[in-house]
Image: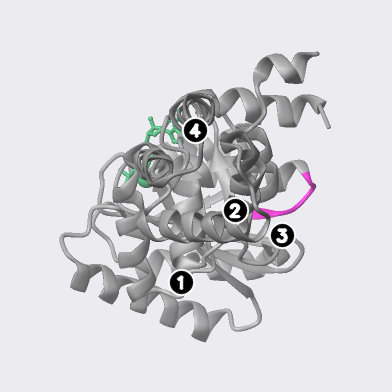
Amino acid sequence: MAGGFFKRLVSGLTKTRDNIVAGMDSIFRGFSKIDEDFYEELEEVLIMGDLGVRATMNILEDLRKKVKEQHIKEPADCRQLLIDSIKEQMDVGEAEYEFENRTSVVLVIGVNGVGKTTTIGKLAGKMRAEGKKVVLAAADTFRAAAGEQLKEWANRANAELIGGQEGSDPASVVYDAVAAAKARHADILLCDTAGRLHNKKNLMEELKKINRILEREYPEAYRETLVVLDATTGQNALAQAKEFSEVADITGIILTKMDGTAKGGIAVAIQAELGIPVKYIGVGETIDDLQKFDSNEFVNALFTSEEKEEE
Ligand SMILES: Nc1nc2c(ncn2[C@@H]2O[C@H](COP(=O)(O)OP(=O)(O)OP(=O)(O)O)[C@@H](O)[C@H]2O)c(=O)[nH]1
Ligand SMILES: [Mg+2]
């Protein structure tokens, strides 16, 4: 099971593990029987670990039921039941990556600073490495340096960039980018958007406009709308995901800054509460720091100690 990939995930989740699993294990060790106090302490660890209220309640309910049915007496015997239950909570079916194999448009949305532009750069790098033709649309015309930043990523990834003047209409940038993507027979068009729209109504209007252009100009393309969330913001990220799901048909989530955060449990909350798959996680600032997300693997990595992995 080792392998560099899993090892990196295990090591990236160190703080989250210290936050959640260490707390759980001390409860399993500290309690001699399964009573109300035991459940209450577990609840606190799960909530503090950013698993979210709903997932926490479901997990505990499931645990109580299994403890009863299987006549479990030892707190330590609950560990595996909890792991299984967390996995069940996160089950949203297998994440689909069809857009990677088809002619597609990926719209990347999220509030400012979460890592949209960086993630697009990483995705572009990944697709280019697979030999795909990639076009980037710099549809964040709101922030002065946004186009330049994406341009650097385009150079790094060796992808083509279509941009517009600062303050120009993002939908018109998307229009131009679609034309370019068609002319060059691109496999994938990645659209960066502005994170700084003053309110929900503006955001909704802008997304609507962009979607209209895509539907009209590029109906043959497979559509993917990914919301980028900063894992270090914990419950705030969950709230953002909810807001975006009200204004857009989200097909997946990208959780960034999973490296070094203690709040990785938010991945559980998002899948359990919203039923939207986390498709990628960002684990650093360089072009290679984007990984596909698999919840089983995530939970396994969370409950594996680094020492054990090295044995
Ligand atoms: N450690 C770490 N840093 C990241 C990750 N993803 C993005 N960042 C950093 O987060 C900061 C913001 O990233 P951007 O890509 O500019 O975020 P954005 O959402 O495009 O921001 P706006 O365009 O201002 O809305 C940068 O310093 C990135 O290097 C990640 O997975 N891990
Ligand atoms: Mg940006």
Establish whether ligand 1 lies closer than 8 Å to the Cβ of label 2: no
Q: Amino acid at mark 4?
A: Met
Q: Which mark is residue 100?
A: 3
The kind of secondary structure element at disc 2 is: helix
Disc 1 versus disc 4: nearer the observer: 4
Q: Which residue is mark 1?
A: 175
**Does the CB distance between marks 3 and 1 fall below 8 Å?**
no
Q: Is residue 238 left or right of residue 87?
A: left
Q: In the rendered structure, which disc, 1 or 4, sits on the residue that comes first in sequence?
A: 4
The kind of secondary structure element at disc 1 is: helix
The kind of secondary structure element at disc 4 is: helix
Q: Residue at x 45, y 34 (%)?
A: 257
Q: Residues within 10 Å of mark 1 (few under 14, many from 20)?
A: many
Q: Which residue is mark 2?
A: 67
Q: 99 or 301: nearer the eye?
A: 301
Q: Which residue is mark 4?
A: 24
Task: Kindly report the distance in space between the C-alpha atoms of the residues bearing marks 2 and 1.
Answer: 58 Å
Q: In the rendered structure, which disc, 3 or 2, sits on the residue that comes first in sequence?
A: 2
User: Magenta residues, as a range?
Assistant: 130-134
Q: Is residue 178 visible?
A: yes
**Does the CB distance between marks 2 and 1 fall below 8 Å?**
no
Is residue 241 depicted above or below 44 in this figure? below
